[in-house]
Each structure stands twice: as structure tokens, then as C-alpha cells.
Image (cartoon, rainbow, N blue to C red):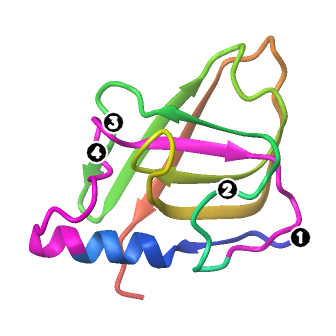
Amino acid sequence: MAITSGLTTAGAVALASFLINDGATLPFNNSNAYLGVGNDNSTAFNVSQTALIGASQQLNPVDTGYPVRTSNSILYQATFYAADAIFDWSEYGIFNAASAGTMLVRVAGDDLGTKTGAEQIVLQITLVISTS
């Protein structure tokens, strides 16, 4: 499967909310941001998706000091400890709550491998706001 990714419709609505500061959605900041991983390796990204697809999935809060903005890029980082997310990681995304939040983006088809219980993995996702 080819790697597919993009901004979800719900994510676009959240960004529009932030632009006019209407408070309609939680920000994707250090207080609310989560990185999620899942094991779906067959469902391509679609803008209408609101959650990861895999039967196995986990969302972890971003690490202290993240996200970090540099110019038009935002770096999110979360640590998945030994007991976390022990399954094949083949989809991931950025969320603004541990459950029932907004999925800003989803990346599918990028098989990051199978995490074992002996590993601690630091996942970084860079969101680039671009004109193209």
C-alpha cells in the first residue's frame, strides 16, 4: 500500500475555528495534543475519517515542551513506553484529546514496524503548513 496522508475535514474545521478564535474546538497544544498509532494497514487516508482505523490503537499525550513551531512547521512528539502500543504500527495521527477528540491528520500505509514490550519509542510527527 502506498503512503497516504492528509488533513481531515474535522481538522480543517478546527483550523478555521482557531483562525477566528471562536473556541469551537480544543487546540492541538501541549495541554490537549495526543499522537495516536494503530495497526490498520489496508485503509487509505480519506478526509472524512475521524479516528484511526485499526483494531489495535493507542493515543499518548505529547511530551513536555511539545508541540514546537518553527516557521510554518509544527513538531509533535510523544513517548510510547515499554507497556504501550504493542502491535504493528501502520497508521498514525494527531489528536486533541485522549478519546472523542478531533483527528487533525492521519497517515496510512507507512509501516513503522511491530513494537515489542521491550521497546520505548519516541514518535515524532511534523505538520507543515504549506501553500502547495
Badge 4: residue crowd in 10 Å (few <14, some 14–19, many ≥20): some
Indicate the secondary structure of the residue bearing disc 1.
loop
Q: Percent from the top left, x then y, of residue 76?
A: 42, 44
Answer whether labels 1 and 2 touch (C-beta < 8 Å).
no
Which residue matches tag 1? 1
Answer whether labels 4 and 3 touch (C-beta < 8 Å).
no
The answer for how far apart the CA atoms under marks 4 and 3 are is 8 Å
- Choose the circle earlier in sequence order: 1 or 3: 1
Residue at image point 49% right, 52% down: 94
Task: Say what amino acid the circle numbered 1 marks.
Answer: Met
Q: Which mark is residue 66?
A: 3
The answer for how far apart the CA atoms under marks 4 and 2 are is 20 Å
The stretch of residues the image draws in magenta is 17-45
Which residue matches tag 2? 52
Residue at image point 62% right, 71% down: 49
The answer for how far apart the CA atoms under marks 1 and 3 are is 31 Å
Residue placed most toward the observer, 30 or 75? 30
Q: Percent from the top left, x then y, of residue 99?
A: 51, 43
- Choose the circle earlier in sequence order: 1 or 2: 1
Q: Residue furthest front?
A: 100
Indicate the secondary structure of the residue bearing disc 3.
loop
Which residue matches tag 4? 29
* Magenta: main secondary structure: loop
